[in-house]
Image (cartoon, rainbow, N blue to C red):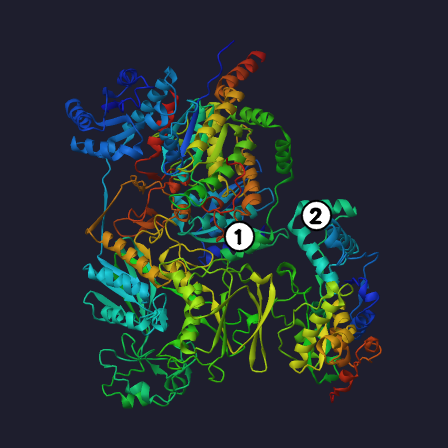
Amino acid sequence: MKIGYYPGCSLEGSSKEYNDSLFAVAEKCGVTLEEIKDWSCCGASAAHNLNHDLSLALPARTLALAGSQGFAEIVVPCAACYSRLASTNHEISENVTVKTKIEGYIDLKLTADVKILTVFEFLQKYIFPTVDKHIVNKLNQKAACYYGCLYTRPKETAAVDQIENPMEMDEVMVKAGATPIDWAFKTECCGAGLSVSRTDIVAKLSGKILEAAADRGAESIVVACPMCHMNLDMRRPEIKKQLKKDINIPVLFITQALGLSMGIPADKLGLNKHYVSTNKVVNCIVKMEA
Amino acid sequence: MKQLQNKVAELFDNGTISLMIGFQNALNKQPVPCFITVASQVERLIYTPECKGNLAVYLHKIEVKQAKKVGIIGNVATLRSLIQLTSENQLGDIEKTVITVNAQNEVIIFANMDEVEAYVQANFPEYTDEDKKLLEQLNAMSRAERWQYWSEQFSVCVKCYACRAVCPMCYCPSCTVESNQPQWIKVSSETTGNLEWHTMRAMHLAGRCINCGECGRICPVGIPVHLLTAQMNKDIEAEFGAKTGFSCKSGYALNTFKPGDKEQFIK
Amino acid sequence: MSEQFEPKIVAFVCNWCTYAGADLAGTSRTKYATNVSIIRFPCTGRIDFMLLMKAFENGADGIIVSGCHPNDCHYTSGNFHARRRWIVFRSLLDFMGFDTDRITFSWVSAAEGTKWASLVNETTEKIRAKGAFTEFKNLDLETFNRLHDEAIAK
Amino acid sequence: MARIGVFICHCGENISATVDVAKVAEKAGKLSGVAFSVDYKYMCSDPGQTLIIEAIKKHKLTGIVVAACSPRMHEGTFRKAAEKAGINPYFCEMANIREQVSWVHPKSDTTTQKALDIVRTLVEKVKKNTALFPIKVPVTKTALVIGGGIAGIQAALDIANAGHQVIMVEKKPSIGGHMSQLSETFPTLDCSQCILTPRMVEVAQHPNITLHTYAEVESVSGFVGNFDVKIKMKAKSVDYSKCTGCGACWQKCPSKKIPDEFNEGMGFRTAIYSPFPQAVPNKPVIDRLNCTWFLKGKCGLCTKICPTGAINYDAVDEFIDVKVGAIVTATGFDLKHADFFPEYGYGKFKDVIDGMQFERLASASGPTAGEIRRPSDGKIPEKIVFVACAGSRDKAKGIEYCSKICCMYTAKHAMLYKHKNHEGKAYVFYMDIRAAGKDYDEFVRRAIEEDEVQYIRGRVSRIYEKNEKLIVKGVDTLMNGEPVDIEADMVVLATAVVANIEAESLAQKLHISYNKHKFFAEAHPKLKPVETNTAGIMLAGACQSAKDIPESVSQASASASKVIGLFSSSELTREPIVAVVNRQAPPNYTSCTGCLLCQEVCPYHAIETEEIKDRAGNVLKVVARVNAGLCQGCGTCVAMCRNKSIDLQGFSNDQMLSEVMALLNS
C-alpha cells in the first residue's frame, strides 16, 4: 500500500526541516512516502485571488496525476497546499460541470478519488499504530499547539473536528510526552497573507499569538504550517518592537516534536534551521527508562 | 439429485413438511411442477438448471395454504418472490421450508427468511443478456417506433391472462381487469383494451415485480410482457434506489415518497 | 381554408388548490380557451392512472393533471405520492412509445388563477399543434386493417 | 331507474349572458335518466330553492344536478334543499358553469356546449351516487395536557374553567416549567413567581384538573375524541396520600451536595427533594441515582424522620390508562448547552454562564438570594458582557432560526444588573435588536438610554481567561468593523432556544409532524397555528417555536378554545367523504388481499388491520380497515389499491369513471 506525497514549494525550500523531520519519523516507523511524479504548484495565495478556474486547475492537475499514478491517499504537509487541494477536491466532487471544465483545461481525467491527508491525519493513521515502541524520550514541557486558519476553515474542507477548538495536534503532543496547553489563539490569524508586504501587521498579529502562548506558560509552540512557522519564528525582531518585550519561545513543526520524542537526532530533524534556538526544547527532554 | 431427494425425504420423516412443491420430468423430459405429499414419492423430484419455473405462485393456492407445512424449491428469482411476498404479508400462515440448489450443486435448506435474504443478496441476479439486448434495442428506438412495436405486440394479445396466472405477485382474489362495476377494461381483446390491460399490469407490478420473466416465457402468442416490468424496475431503482425481492423490510417504492423527488416534468 | 382543429382536453384537478385556482380565474373574469373541461377530485393522490387511460380511450386528445404545490397539499402528502406515481407512469408510457407530451402535469395553487388560464391556453395550443390523438384512437382500426391485409395476403 | 332533475341557474346575467341556459335546460332534459330540467334566474334564492324542493317531490326525483356557481360556493345550500325535499343530501351534485364556463368564455355555441357537457358529466356522476350519512364520532370530554409550564397551565385552566375534565402530565416533580425559574419578566419587570405561583396553586386545587407530576406519556392510540393514553407514573418513593410536605426529610437528608437542576447547577439540593419552595405539589420525590439508600442500601434516615411514614423505598413505576378526547402538547423548550461553544469557553470558564443561569442569580429565591455574583469566586462583577445570538441565526452552528426571546431577556438582564450595581458596566454584543412587541422596543431603549447599557453591534469571536479576567474578543460593525476587546468579570451567553430533548419521541407517539429542528409542526402556518395535522391534538407554547410568555399564554388559550369547541357537543359530526374497504361474500369476504401497502400512504395513519374470523373464531385473513374517525378523505389509498378494494365515498371509482366517459361521449 503506497502513500503519495505532495511536498509543494515550501517543503523543498523555506521549510525543508518540515520535510526532513516528516521523512525521518516515517522512516523510523517503516512507512514509505512516494512523491507524486511531475506535481505542479498548488497556486496558493496567488491563483485564487486572480483566476478561479486557474486556482482549481493547478491542484486538479496534481490530483489527476496522483490518481493516474495509483495513489489512493496523498499526504500534504503544507497547510496552504492542503487547503487548495482540499477545496478543489470539494468543488469538483460537488459540481460535475466544473469538473468537466477543469478536466478540459488540464487535459487529464479526474476519475479516481484521491484522499488528501493532513500531516496529523497521516500521523494518526500510519504512525500512531507503531509509534509507541519507538518513543524513547518525554518532551517534558508545556506546548501550545497552533493551527492557524488554513486547516480550520472553510467549514466544508476543514481538516479538524472542532473548527473553533481543534485538538488533533494536541493529541500528537500528548504522545510525545508534552502537555498541550488550553489556550484561545489556536486558530487566530498569523498574518501569513501579508508576510512580505506588511510585516508590521504580521508582527502585530503574530505578536498577539506569541504573547498569549507566553501568558499561558507555553515552553514551545507547535505548528503544521510553513507560513505560520515562518511568521512566528522569523519575525521575532519586528514582534519584539511591537510588543516591547522579547519572547523567545521556540516554534517547532509537529513532526520535529514527535521526532525528538522518538530519539531522532536534532540535526536530522533540522532543528538547527530555525531562527529562534530550539535548545530550550531539546534540553527539557527526559529519557524514558525502558 | 439423490442428495436433494434424501434431504426432502428427511423433511417428510421428521414432520417438517407435509407437502413438497418441486419439479419432476414430464414425458417430454421437460421439467414440470410436481406436488409430493409422501416421502415414498421423493424420487420423482428433480432439480436442474432447466427448472426455471417460479413455484412461488402455487403458495397462493388454497390447497397449499391448507397443507400449512410446505417445502418449496426454486432459483434466486423464486426466493426473491418469497421475500417480496413476505414483505406484502402474504405468507403469514404458511410454515415454509425453503430449498435451493446453488451453483456448486449443493442443496441448501434455509432455516429462516433472514438466511434466504442473505443468499439472495449474495447472488443477486442480473438481467439475462437476452433481456438486456431487447431493452437496449427498444430504448434505442424512436418513440414512434416503440409505439409501433408495442401496439403490434398487443394487437395479438388474446387476453388469456396466462401472464397473470403465472405471476406470484398477482395474487388478488379478484382482479381489476375483470371488474365490471365499473368496467375498467373492455372484455373483448381489442388492441386499446389490451394496451390498457398491459399498462395496468405493469403499473401494478412496478416496484413489486421480481424479474423472474415467467410472464414473458409463458405468453402463448409470444409477447415479451416481462420487458415492461423489467424496464419499470430499472427506472425505479435508478430513480428511487429501491430493489424488489431484496429484503423483507425494504418497502414499496410507490407507497412512499421523498420531498426531493424529481419534478422537472411538472409545470 | 379548413377550420382549425379543436382538441378535447380533460383536466384532472384537486379540489383544494387547482379547482379553487380555476374558480379564481373565473371570479377575476380571465378569459381562456374552451377546450378544457375539469373533473374534480379531492386530491391529486386520488387520481388513478387508469382514469387517464380511459380518457384517452374515450377520445381525449390531451390531459391536464394538476394539484397543490409540494408542501401545500391539503392532506399534507397526497401530491407527493401522486408525483411519484406520475414519475413511474410516465416512464412506463414512454417505454411503450406512448406520446407523453399529451399529458401536462402541473402545480396550480388556489391563488394562481392566471397560471391556470395560461396553462389551459398553452396546453390547448400544444395539443392543437399536435393534432387529434389518432395514434391511439385508430389503434383498433389499424389492427383490424393489418390483420385483414395479412389474411388477404395468405 | 334513476330520475334526475337538472336545474340551470342564470345567476342573474352572470351565466345567461354567455350561456344559452334555455338550450342547456332543453338538451339536458333529453339526457337519459333525466326526468325533469328547468332554468331559473336565481337558484340559490328562496324561490329557487323552493322550485327545487317542489320539483323533487312532484317528479319523485332520485337525484339532482344544479348547474350554477362553484360547489365551493353553494354545494351546502343545495344539499340542504335536497334534504328538505326528503332525499339524501349526497344525491345532489353541482355543475360549475359560472366560474369555469360563463365567466371565462365568450358568448358562443361552444360555451353553451361546454356547459351542457359539464351538466351531462355531473348527471352521470349523480346516477352513481349513493346515500351517505354524516359520521358521528363520540367525544370523550376530557383533555390531556402534556407539560406543566405556563402554556400547559393556561390551557388546562381555560379548559377546566369551561367545565371540562383535564388531566395534566408533568415529567418533573413540580409544575411551573421554565417560568418558575425566571427572576423578573420583561417588559414590566414584575416578579415571575409572584404571577405564576397563584396559577400553579389554582391548577392543583381545581376540581376539574387531575395533576400527575413526575409522570410521562408512555403511548397514545385512537383518534380525535377518542384517544387512549398510557401514562407512566415514575416511582416517587414517597406516598403522597400520607406525605404532608412538612419538609423534615429534605432538611435532614445527609446527601446534600447534588447539583440543583432548578438553580441550573449553581446550587445544591438533597437526594429527597422538592425542586423549589413554591413547588406544586410541594411534596418530595427521591432521586434514586443519588440516594445513599438506593446506592449503598444504607441510611434510611428519611424513613426514620418522616412523621407520617410516607417514605416508600419499594415504590415502582406504575402505568395508568386514560381516555381523552383531545390533547394539548405544551412540552416547552430547552436551551442549547455546553461544549457547543468551545470558542466561548462555555462549560470551561466558571464565569461564562447562560441566560437561565443568570435568571437564577438575579432571582431572589436563587443561590445568591438575588445578588449577582460570579460563580467562580462569588465576587460582584464590575464588568459584565452579554452575548446575544449565541448559536441562534448561525448556520455554522446548525441553527438558522432566531430564538426570539433573547433580545428581550438580554436587555432585561443588563437592566437588572445595572439596577443592582449602579457602578457596574454592562455590554451587549448583538446582531440586530428584535423587540417587536407591545412596549418591547421602549423597554430596550430604556436599557440603553436610562440604564446606560452599552450595545455593540457585532459578534464575539472568542472568549478566554487572562489573569482572572475574561477577555471578550468582538467586533463593532458600526465602527467599520473595529475589533473590540473587553476585559469582563462575567459573560452571559443568550444561548439558542432548542426543542425539548424528548420532542421527537413524543411526536412519534402522537403521530404529529415536526420540523428539522424538532419543533412541532402546526397544521397551517397562518390559518391553523395551534392545530396539528392529527385531528384533536393542539399545540401550546414553545414546543411549536421559540416564544415568550405572552405569546405562549395566548397560544395556550387559543388551543384551549379549540378543545372547548371540540367538546361543545358529545358527538363529532364528520363529512362521510371517507375511504372504505369493500365487503364480499365468502370465501373472499373482501377483495382486499391484506398486502397493507396502503397503510404507508395514508397521511393520517387511518388504515388499520382487521382480522376476518369464521364462526369458530379462527382467523381466516387479515385485511385493511379504514378508521372513519381518522380518515380525511384524500383518496390516496384508493388510487394505489391494485384491485380497487378501497373506494372513496363521494368520489368512488364508479363515479369518477362515469364522469370521464360522460364528459367525452356526447
Residue D452 is situated, as x and y percent measured from the top left of the image, at 46, 70
Q: CA distance from mark 1 to mark 2?
A: 50 Å
Which disc is residue A99 wearing?
2
Q: Secondary structure at mark 2?
A: helix
Q: Chain of mark 1?
A: B
Q: Residues within 10 Å of mark 1 (few under 14, many from 20)?
A: many
Residue B212 is situated, as x and y percent measured from the top left of the image, at 55, 42
Nearest the viewer among D640 and D560 is: D560
Q: Are marks 1 and 2 in contact (CB under 8 Å)?
A: no
Residue A154 is situated, as x and y percent measured from the top left of the image, at 64, 60
Nearest the viewer among D80 and B42 is: D80
Q: Residue at x 80, y 56 (%)?
A: A69
The part of the image, by quadrant, that contains residue D262 is bottom left
Which disc is residue B99 wearing?
1
| Quadrant that contains the N terminus of chain D | top left
D53 sits to left or right of A104 = left
Q: Residue at x 72, y 44 (%)?
A: A101
Nearest the viewer among B249 and D658 is: D658
The relative height of residue D109 versus residue D395 in the rendered view (above or below) is: above
Q: Chain of mark 2?
A: A
Residue type pointed to by label 1: Ile
The part of the image, by quadrant, that contains residue B225 is top right
Residue type pointed to by label 2: Lys
Q: Residues within 10 Å of mark 2 (few under 14, many from 20)?
A: many
Q: Residue at x 50, y 40 (%)?
A: B206
Which disc is residue A27 wearing?
none
Q: Given the current orientation, which residue lies at the most extreme top position?
A: C1
